[in-house]
Amino acid sequence: MSKKNIINFQSVDSIQIYLNSGNADTYINGSKKSSVVFFFEDPVTVDKKVVSKTLSVVNAQFPVSWYLINSTNNAIIINFTYYYIPYGNYNVTNFVQQCISTFGSNFNVSYNSITNKFTFTNSIADFTFSDNTNSLFKILGFQPGKTYTSTSKTLIAPYSVDFGGLLKLEIKSSTFTLQNCNSYNKGRSRTICSVPVNANQNGIIMYNNFTQYKSIIKNSIITDINIDIHDEFKNFIDFNNHDWSITLQIDMFSENIEDLDTLGDVYEYFRSEN
């Protein structure tokens, strides 16, 4: 009668999914290319032995092709009239010139390099600055959600100007069920990964998952993948028709119980399985 040697061990199978926005099947927000869907002819399926699965972003490459001033931050209300700064990348000098051109000849805008603040003056009368949904306030140095009224036809911004741009990109997906949270909605998030914006305008963000962070997922079969790219305030990024790449990795952990005599038998078992 043979001796039974029950060995319980865990195995890990990994697959990588290489995504490039240039070959997405559906562009939900058109040339912005920040909400896309990929469909797969060969679905990713999970073996019944798998007891847990994780998802991670191994690396990603994003062009810094969006504008500093864009549809999310280009408007201000002056005396109940909307004014819009044209989309584009600005420094302080050409932004001051654009403000004067947009607000009208009665306005003058000056910049104090010591305090890093704007001063607005009107040659005719006092005026009011009000906020709106696509607010220019943060760029100008005003508190979003407030209303400011000039004194003696002059209004000095209470805070310094902000030409720093975005702090991070958030890679999101409705394909996967995640347990991650964020402070914006005070609860669960679709965010797979947060990517720091560490490149200048017209440069390339090169992200690598040095922490090897992985999110637990529940999916048993994957036939399509939705990817959304947001800023930290849930605004879609406008890549201006430029393409990005992301490498996803799914790790599948299986519990194995086999009647094997030695560790060598375990290795031989895996060779036969592969």
Image (cartoon, rainbow, N blue to C red):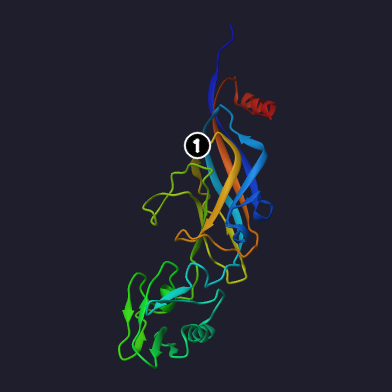
Tell me which residue sits at (38%, 54%) in the image. Answer: 185
Q: What amino acid is found at the position of numbered circle 1 in the picture?
A: Lys
Residues 53 and 5: in front is 53
- Horizontally, residue 74 falls left or right of residue 199, namely left
Tell me which residue sits at (47%, 44%) in the image. Answer: 178
Q: Quadrant of the N terminus?
A: top right
Residues 178 and 104: in front is 104
Q: Position of residue 31 (x, y in %)?
A: 63, 60
Which residue in the protein does label 1 denote? Answer: 218
* Circle 1 residues within 10 Å: few <14, some 14–19, many ≥20: few
Q: Position of residue 122 (x, y in %)?
A: 39, 90
- Horizontally, residue 52 falls left or right of residue 37, namely left
Say if 63 sits above or below 185 in the image.
below
Q: Position of residue 53 (x, y in %)?
A: 53, 37
Say if 203 sits above or below 207 in the image.
below
Q: Position of residue 129 (x, y in %)?
A: 37, 79
